[in-house]
Image (cartoon, helix red, strand yellow):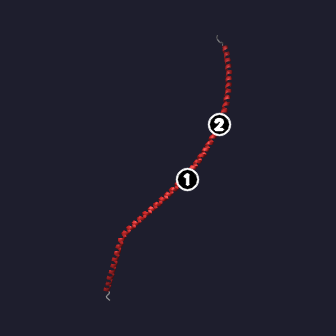
Amino acid sequence: MALTDEDKVWLTAQLATALGSERENTAAMFAHEREYIDTKFAAEREYIDSRFAQEREHTDAMFAQEREYTAAMFAREREHTDAMFAQERESVAKLLAEVMRREREITNAALEHLETRLLTAFHQWASPMEMRARSHAAALRALDVELESVSERVKKLEDPK
């Protein structure tokens, strides 16, 4: 049997009404489900947010303790390092003073040795020179005496009185 145009219009209207009411029912059901899910997720989100806040506070507290502990350890290590550095500085200063003292002693000894060698060389040189000078002085005195006697003789000859 074939459908007439009126039947087709009527059937279309019936289907549209049925689909419209079904659509409304589905939309109402989805709205109800959405409300239920939103409520459930809101509660879950609040729980998760509160747990996250608690964990964050706990983590911040732990990090604060770790920061304080690390700062205290760093301060102790710095004091220890400063103390060791001060000891090393004193040790180096003492060592440097000792090295300088030894260098002064070595320099003084070398200078004394050099002075002794110079004086010895001078005396070795001066001793023959002094002997020559004495012998020349003695020869000059002898010449002076001779010259004096010659001069007296010449005066006697020139002055016949």
Q: How many marks?
A: 2
* Label 2: which secondary element: helix
Residue at image location 68% in from the left, 17% down from the top: 14
Per the model, the C-alpha gap separating discs 1 and 2 is: 47 Å
- Above or below: residue 152 compared with residue 99: below
* Amino acid marked by disc 2: Arg
Image coords of residue 76 (percent x, y)? 58, 49
Residue annotated with mark 2: 51
Q: Quadrant of the N terminus?
A: top right
Which is nearer the eye, 145 or 87? 87
Kindly give the residue lying farthest to the top in the view shown: 1
**Neighbour class for label 2 at 10 Å: few (<14), some, many (≥20)?**
few
Image coords of residue 79 (percent x, y)? 57, 51
Residue at image location 55% in from the left, 53% down from the top: 83
Name the image quarter holding residue 65: top right
Q: Is residue 106 left or right of residue 6?
A: left
Q: Is residue 157 left or right of residue 52?
A: left
Which is nearer the eye, 30 or 9? 30
* Amino acid marked by disc 1: Ala
- Above or below: residue 47 compared with residue 2: below
Marked residue nearer the N-terminal end (1 or 2):
2
- Above or below: residue 116 compared with residue 147: above
Residue annotated with mark 1: 83
Image coords of residue 104 (percent x, y)? 46, 61
Which is nearer the eye, 100 or 160? 100
Residue at image location 50% in from the left, 58% down from the top: 94
Q: Is residue 157 left or right of residue 49?
A: left
